Image: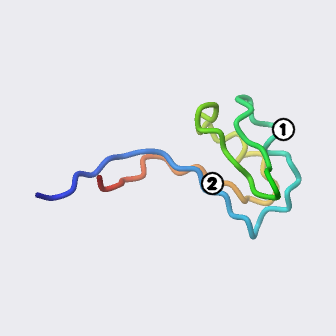
Amino acid sequence: MGKKSQTSDDFVWQRERCKKCDICQKMCPQHGLKFVDGVLTRDQAKCNLCGICALYCPDQAITIIKNVKRKT
């Protein structure tokens, strides 16, 4: 039996590009982002993947990918 494809959205943070300026965390209207020990973490219960963090990131370290196909 073959695997089914499922679409979802995805949040990608590129650590090597990020200068940890904290703008993403400050701009998030849902308060869904925070830095923990130098790593950006996303609270999935709060973050709705609106993309405002990616829009304001001066380092272009955040990407929101819509409708990613995943096999289940």
The residue that mark 2 highlights is 63
Q: Amino acid at mark 1?
A: Lys
Q: Which mark is residue 12?
A: none
Q: Secondary structure at mark 2?
A: strand
The residue that mark 1 highlights is 26
Q: Secondary structure at mark 1?
A: helix
Q: Residue furthest right?
A: 21
Proximity of marks 2 and 1: CB atoms separated by less than 8 Å: no
Q: Amino acid at mark 2?
A: Thr
Q: Residue furthest left?
A: 1
Residue found at x 88% / y 53%: 21
What's the image's color scheme?
A: rainbow
Residue 60 picture location, percent across and down: 73, 58
Residue 71 picture location, percent across and down: 30, 56
Q: Residue furthest bottom?
A: 16
Quadrant housing residue 39: bottom right
Q: Is residue 55 left or right of residue 72?
A: right
Across the whole image, how many numbered discs are drawn on residues?
2
Q: CA distance from mark 2 to mark 1?
A: 17 Å
Q: Is residue 43 left or right of residue 24?
A: left
Q: Residue furthest front?
A: 37
Residue found at x 21% / y 56%: 3
Mark 2: give few (<14), some (14-19) or many (20+) Cα within 10 Å: some
